[in-house]
Image (cartoon, rainbow, N blue to C red):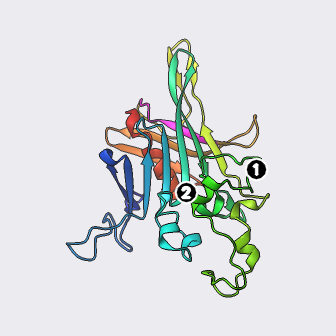
Amino acid sequence: MLSETGDMLMTAKWLRRESRVDFFLAAEGTSGTPKSPASPSKKPKPAFSMTHSENNDNWVLKQMSCKHCIQRPKHLTCEALGKAQQIAFIQHARKKVGKALVHYVDTRIPALVDDLESMVWCPVTEGRDLCEKRSPAHNERTPEQRRRFGHTRTPSNNTPSNTPSGTPKEAIRRPQGDSEEDQDPLCFASKLPTWDESLKHLIMNFGDRTPKSSPMNFMIVNKATEEDEQLVMLHAKLSANTYCLDFKHPLSTVQAFGIALTALPWD
């Protein structure tokens, strides 16, 4: 992934056999050079990873480190439980528009903190994955959930605590998802094209972009209301090996890049 000035922002490697895409950050202060390992014998570790289902319809973008699990025993961290800190969930479906079937993308990302920064979606702390909806009994975890997410009782006065000194007990006792204000994920979806009967073709306005015909041409919108669709991402094929990726807040670079890469199986 390159910036408009040609600077390398991020690279990705699709490991098909493992149903995973690894993301690597570019080296700081360089142009067009991915971050290299410290020594030839060591492989660089991905900063992010995205797993997908066998049919390529469900994708989960994760960050390998999680600040909520720093004080947990290693075997009870979200990474050790196969979850990791979740940054985006992307689900694909097919919808009929006119006489054609189009790919439809549903995307969920963590809510924002103070409308600026994405919150940390730790499935161990939240008690649910990013793709799961809040249940009526969200605050009551089942025994299975306790085993699955490594839930333990709040330490008593006589029990050693792994939390930093000065941390209020309420912060330990109350899961992150208990807040009623901004814990539900932000949801985005594809903007559907329209069917032109005279052309017998799907059409969509890409503004000043002039894309080539491709199933990988799509837009993501935030539907604030039924009448108002706020465009947050545009992906289009410009030439045989060149694609444009335009996006804006609240999507981050890795979230937009991840959503774009989920369209690779379409081409």
| Residue 13 percent across, percent down from the top left | 33, 53
Q: Is residue 60 within the magenta segment? A: no
| Residue 243 percent across, percent down from the top left | 40, 44
- Quadrant of residue 95 in the image? top right
Residue 95 visible here: yes
Is the residue marked by circle 1 packed among few (<14), some (14-19), or many (20+) residues within 10 Å?
A: few
Residue 123 visible here: no
Q: Residue furthest bottom?
A: 165
Q: How many marks?
A: 2
Q: Name the amino acid type tagged 2.
A: Ile
Q: Is residue 142 above or below residue 202?
A: below
SS label for mark 2: strand
**Which quarter of the image is occupied by the C terminus?**
top left
Residue at left 56%, top 77%? 71
| Residue 107 percent across, percent down from the top left | 58, 44
Residue at left 74%, top 67%? 174
- What whole-number distance in Å separates the C-alpha atoms at marks 2 and 1? 24 Å
Q: Name the amino acid type tagged 1.
A: Ala
Q: Which mark is residue 87?
A: 2
Which region of the structure is painted magenta? 213-221
Residue at left 67%, top 64%? 116
Discs 2/1, front:
1
* Residue that numbered label 1 is attached to: 137
Q: Which is more N-terminal, label 1 or label 2? A: 2
**Which quarter of the image is occupied by the N terminus?**
bottom left
Q: Is residue 216 within the magenta segment? A: yes
| Residue 167 percent across, percent down from the top left | 70, 82
Is the residue marked by circle 2 packed among few (<14), some (14-19), or many (20+) residues within 10 Å?
A: many
- Quadrant of residue 47 in the image? bottom left
Tell me if 20 is positioned left or right of 118 in this view: left
